[in-house]
């Protein structure tokens, strides 16, 4: 799934972070645990450099309260000061810069935010919460896969008796009337298991192993999607959605069409069952096996491992550096 330049990325990629001096144990440094985890891992990695002249990319620490989705004026002021003190932004108008914004940044008339939105790589949380399409630009931006309590130490029971589909409820489900109605339909089906996520890891592992498909509702405001555990246990993800999904993690690296299904919610339970049964008699086994292989790329590790979520984020940034070379050729 990866191009040969992955190894080159491991060897050569260097990132300069503007004046980042954070107490990583302080509360409220970042808005979500996955952004905090990513930043801690990045700053402790060998990818960072103190010499901006050797950097391929520049990290703009628009951290709370300067997240441009929260404080546009503060973010604009930060970039204005950045371009006044350092030469690097103006060289490419921000094209070799990236920043964290969990909820994504919308369009704006301010020059600094226009350049940030149009040129810089935005790293957001998947799914981008209730986002219209303009909050995420698929060819440019990156989403972080969810950081959830996975089942890394659990044995996968490949012999478990299978049900058709499984869904782990959330307390947030009741806030969405359309979702509540849809789930009520599914609860009436005998081959579906709809329940609150078991607190016992062994029980949860068994649920995933004994399910052919695992359901996830896109746009429901949830960020606890345990896609990694589902795929690792051979449970093919099914994204129930009301609009096209543009923000899947690592979409230019992973071939999601071969790993998961997307089913429109407006077709109701009957449409979902039809799609699942058709897949079961067709490409299910291939999708299941590919999902198990691909799950390594969605896993966050306290000590980064080859091809894991952290390294896959870095690889996506590395692949976007071609924009930098183009901008510099124009300047030269």
Image (cartoon, rainbow, N blue to C red):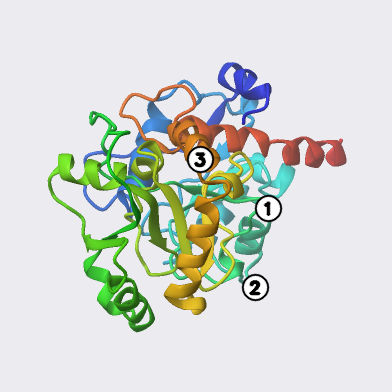
Q: Secondary structure at mark 1?
A: helix
Q: Quadrant of residue 97?
A: top right
Q: Residue at x 65, y 63 (%)?
A: 114
Depth check: give the residue in front, 227 or 85. 227
Query: Where the C terminus falls, by quadrant?
Result: top right
Q: What distance separates the C-alpha of mark 3 from that of mark 1?
A: 41 Å
The residue lying furthest to the left in this view is 200
* Residue 7 rendering spot, x and y as whole percentages: 61, 18
| Residue sitting at x 66%, y 64% | 111
**Mark 3 or 2, closer to the camera:** 3
N-terminal of the two: label 3 or label 1? 1
Residue under numbered circle 1: 119
Q: Residue at x 30, y 48 (%)?
A: 33
Q: Judging from the image, what secondary structure is the residue with disc 3 in?
A: helix
Q: Nearer the viewer, mark 1 or mark 2?
A: 1
Residue 189 relative to residue 53: left or right: left
The one of 155 and 107 positioned closer to us in this rendering: 155
Q: Position of residue 66 (x, y in %)?
A: 42, 58
Name the residue that disc number 3 marks.
285
**Residue 50 falls left or right of residue 318:** left
Q: Quadrant of the N terminus?
A: top right
Residue 18 visible = no
**Image x and y of residue 12, in percent:** 61, 19
The residue pinned by badge 2 equals: 109
Q: Residues within 10 Å of mark 2 (few under 14, many from 20)?
A: few
Q: Examine the rendered structure and indicate whether residue 245 appears above or below residue 281.
A: below
Cα distance between the residues tagged 1 and 2: 14 Å
Could you tell me if residue 67 is visible in this image?
yes
């Amino acid at each position: 799934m990866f191009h040969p330049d992955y190894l080159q990325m491991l060897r050569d990629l260097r990132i300069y972070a503007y004046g980042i001096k954070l107490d990583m144990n302080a509360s409220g440094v970042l808005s979500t645990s996955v952004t905090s985890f990513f930043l801690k891992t990045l700053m402790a990695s060998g990818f960072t450099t103190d010499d901006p002249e050797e950097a391929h990319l520049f990290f703009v620490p628009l951290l709370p309260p300067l997240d441009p989705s929260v404080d546009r004026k503060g973010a604009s002021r930060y970039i204005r000061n950045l371009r006044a003190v350092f030469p690097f932004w103006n060289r490419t108008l921000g094209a070799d810069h990236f920043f964290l914004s969990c909820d994504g940044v919308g369009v704006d008339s301010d020059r600094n935010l226009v350049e940030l939105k149009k040129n810089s790589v935005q790293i957001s949380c998947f799914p981008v919460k209730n986002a219209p399409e303009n909050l995420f630009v698929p060819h440019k931006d990156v989403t972080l896969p969810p950081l959830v309590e996975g089942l890394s130490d659990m044995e996968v029971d490949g012999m478990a008796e299978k049900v058709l589909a499984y869904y782990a409820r959330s307390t947030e489900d009741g806030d969405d009337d359309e979702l509540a109605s849809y789930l009520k339909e599914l609860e009436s089906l005998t081959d579906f298991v709809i329940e609150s996520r078991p607190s016992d890891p062994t029980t949860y592992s068994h649920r995933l192993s004994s399910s052919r498909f695992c359901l996830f509702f896109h746009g429901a405001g949830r960020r606890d999607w345990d896609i990694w555990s589902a795929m690792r246990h051979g449970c093919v993800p099914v994204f129930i959605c009301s609009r096209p999904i543009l923000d899947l993690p690592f979409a230019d690296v992973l071939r999601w069409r071969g790993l998961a299904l997307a089913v429109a919610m407006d077709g109701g339970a009957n449409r979902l069952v039809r799609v699942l049964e058709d897949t079961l008699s067709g490409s299910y086994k291939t999708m299941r096996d590919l999902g198990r292989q691909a799950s390594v790329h969605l896993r966050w590790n306290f000590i980064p491992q080859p091809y894991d979520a952290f390294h896959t984020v870095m690889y996506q940034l590395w692949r976007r550096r071609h924009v930098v070379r183009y901008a510099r050729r124009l300047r030269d």
